[in-house]
Image: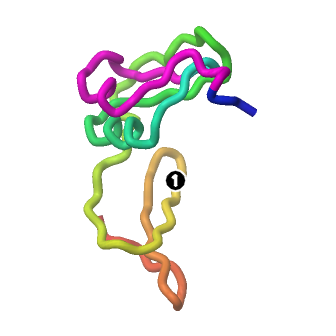
Amino acid sequence: MMRISDVVKLITERDVQDGRLGDPIVIDAETAITPSALDRAALLGLRVVFARERGVAPPRPHSQSAALPVVELPDGQYLVHVNRGQTRIFRLTPTGPVPVDS
């Protein structure tokens, strides 16, 4: 279990917004990232790679963006299903999940 005292580097939303980190943003064992920084990275279309070990090289870039598209949805509970890189969103209703048209 990681303790805050063990973290060498903390990435904030401002770090992501200011473009200091590049693409992809690599989070290794000695780095932490705030939830708002993750949100900002997604909005900017930046990839975030979580590595288990310090100094792990990021993956090679590929033709498709790894970031999920931004979808405007009303408040509610949703289920996101990812299968072979394809994402489907379902709104959770009292009668069961209902697919959301994208």
Q: Identify the residue position indicated by label 1 in the image.
A: 82
Residue 39 on the magenta segment? no
Residue drawn at x 57%, y 15% is 8
Q: Position of residue 49 (x, y in %)?
A: 50, 27
User: Is residue 1 positioned above or below 80 on the image?
Assistant: above
**Left or right of 6 in this view: 58:** left
Residue 25 on the magenta segment? yes
Residue drawn at x 69%, y 30% is 3
User: Is residue 98 positioned above or below 28 on the image?
Assistant: below
Give the residue type at disc 1.
Val
Q: Position of residue 30 (x, y in %)?
A: 61, 18
User: Is residue 54 positioned above or below 38 on the image?
Assistant: above
**Left or right of 16 in this view: 11:** right
Q: Position of residue 98 (x, y in %)?
A: 44, 79
Colouring used for the render? rainbow
Residue farthest front in this picture: 5
User: Is residue 46 positioned above or below 92 on the image?
Assistant: above
Number of marks drawn: 1
Which residues are drawn in magenta?
5-27
